[in-house]
Image: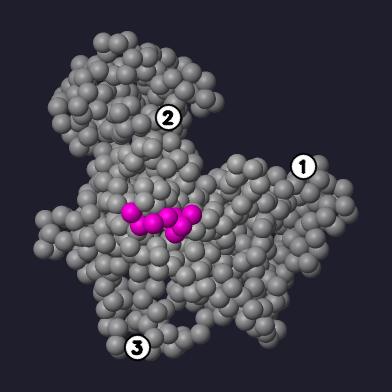
Amino acid sequence: MSANPSIMNPEIERWTFTIPLALSAHSRAEQFRRYQSNPDKAKQVYLNTLAVYAVNVYLQCRGFETDLEKSASWDPVMQTLMDVADLMVKDRGKLECRPVLPDAEVMYVPQEVWDDQIGYVAVQLNESLREATVLGFVDKVSRSHLSLHQLRSLAELPEHINKFSPLVKLSQWLEGVFAAGWQAVEALLSKEPELAFSLRGAPGVRRCKLIELGTPSQAVAMIVALTEESEQEIDITVDVQPVEGQTYLPPNLHLMVLDEDGEVVIDARARSDNRSIQLEFGGESEDRFGVKVALDEVSVTENFVI
Amino acid sequence: MVTTLLTSCTPSGTFITMDERLAQIVTEAQRHAPQAEERQLALIRLVDEILRSRQICRPLGSQPLFGVYQEIYEQVRQQLLLDVGEQLNQYNPKQMTVRAWTNTLRNQAIRKILDDAQLKKLAIEVQRHPPYTEFRQYALGELVEAIRLSGRLCHPHRGSFSPQFYDLLYEEAVNKTLTYVCRKINNYDPERGEKKFMNWVNFRLERVFIESYHEFKEPNIRDLPSLTELEKIVQPEEPHSLFERIRECIEEEENSFRQAHIRNRPDANFRAIALARLSRRSWEEISAELRIPLPTLSSFFQRCCEKFRPKFKQYL
């Protein structure tokens, strides 16, 4: 029998995230509870607040930004009108955070929160309400009671949220405002990347983002450059380059520009000796488009609005 | 804590729980003499079983462990083999459940391995990946659990408070510190803080602890309600409560609430539905009465609530 410690034990227990519910969680829950004189509603609001708190901590521990003020669950009027426990994840969407009682085997999702969520997270509370365990999630519900066995592993949640890529607002780039992930080209690629001639020396703005296609070794750098042609029109160049340490792009890398409806309007593929692929096109203010990078089955789409 | 359910199938085809499996392997290992090869093999099986419930050095997706995670895993495994080997014969099932015993051993081994140098490596690993990438998120998760399991978080001002209040303040501070570490990990400079990672973390913990004290010292919160206690709280009916004001607002509002309605059904408008919901009527009832499918109704209602949020803010 091999005693090689590098052989991974293939089975591992499900990942869950447990945190204590202390002063700020309870004081906020109490603050909201006081608006409700109906005992059932009061309890509902209290527990919903604790559940949202727990998921909020979890998300911040994964580097996501949240917006409690924008969440209906943090608004006493919304709390009164609906059994709501949503948490707005900045630029991504809302997660509904459902409290699960200690002995429960199902997650209850009321009808009035079935729409417009990017996922539903089950948060188990213990009897003393001093501890919350984020159990897992589902991306859709079609019934109000969901067995806990049907939850997806919490380990998959960050990737799931990542899919909801924030719309990149290019008009903000011209004002020097950039969303997270879009860095100066020099930050990601130390050697001067080969750019289309038209951009060298031209005024404008360009940023770079790392696009992971499955594994880090299959990552590429996407460079998007803008130049203002006129007040309304903008010229856009999209460049895909290999990352630090690699000379060529993965062969068969597929770069596409999609229109508002997701239809492919420009298409390019890398050959085995490609160091970069470039696409150029123009657009006007408010135009939306997507840039999709695909390698075999894996693809990443970045969505933009001018 | 979530109790683990049925997970494994023995050769005879019956299902046993994780805890039972653990107990079986312990008993099996205890049967052999300390020098016997069977014992060593049984110990390996036991250690691997114990590590199935670990919170750190978990594989990312279907990939094998790599880098610092693999390093820590192997060290923990070796340490655990030693520790379990030494303590196996002292284990008494009457004193402690097998799960509690193995968890204690597992956590002790992890604490021994997670020194500042390892934690620092974990932190630097986070910094290597851009935000919102799977690797970064994985690395953050590992770092958070490692900090918690390392036992290297300080306990500032311990003697100054009653144990109960201290626990609450401390937990609050730890939660805030962990989220801070994750949000600001790019600011961590490995060259500073005497080159110790935990100095950066604990510096923050101490500060946040004091801030939390100032935030929560008035009123002096000592008891937080449990689930049972929560159910017993009686809130007196307030005149002109928020509930009443919302209801009035919806009843008396001139236009928008009435005009927002389901296509071709002016009677199925937000005003009517909201008032019905405020009167505690169920979706099933409202759906039956209006003869509109439940999902259509609840979906419409949800969207209207969001849409009218600013309006409610204005009125209330």
Q: Nearer the viewer, residue B285 or B22?
A: B22
Q: Amino acid at mark 1?
A: Arg
Residue matched to label 1: B263
- Chain under numbered label 3: B
Label 1 close to label 2 by CB (< 8 Å): no
What is the three-letter code of the residue carrying label 3? Phe
Q: Nearer the viewer, mark 1 or mark 2?
A: 2
Look at the image and tell me in which quarter the N terminus of chain A lies: top left
- The structure residue drawn at horizontal position 26% and vertical position 24%, both measured from the top left corner, is A242
Name the subunit of mark 1. B
Disc sitting over residue B161 in the figure: 3
Which residue corresponds to mark 2?
A: A300
Residue at disc 2, secondary structure: strand
Viewport quadrant of the C terminus of chain A: top left
Q: Which residues are magenta?
A: B28-35
Distance from Cα at disc 1 to Cα at disc 2: 37 Å
Cα separation between marks 1 and 3:
61 Å
Q: Please report the residue visible at 30 percent of the width from the left and 11 percent of the height from the top.
A: A272
* Residue that appears at 77% across and 42% down: B263
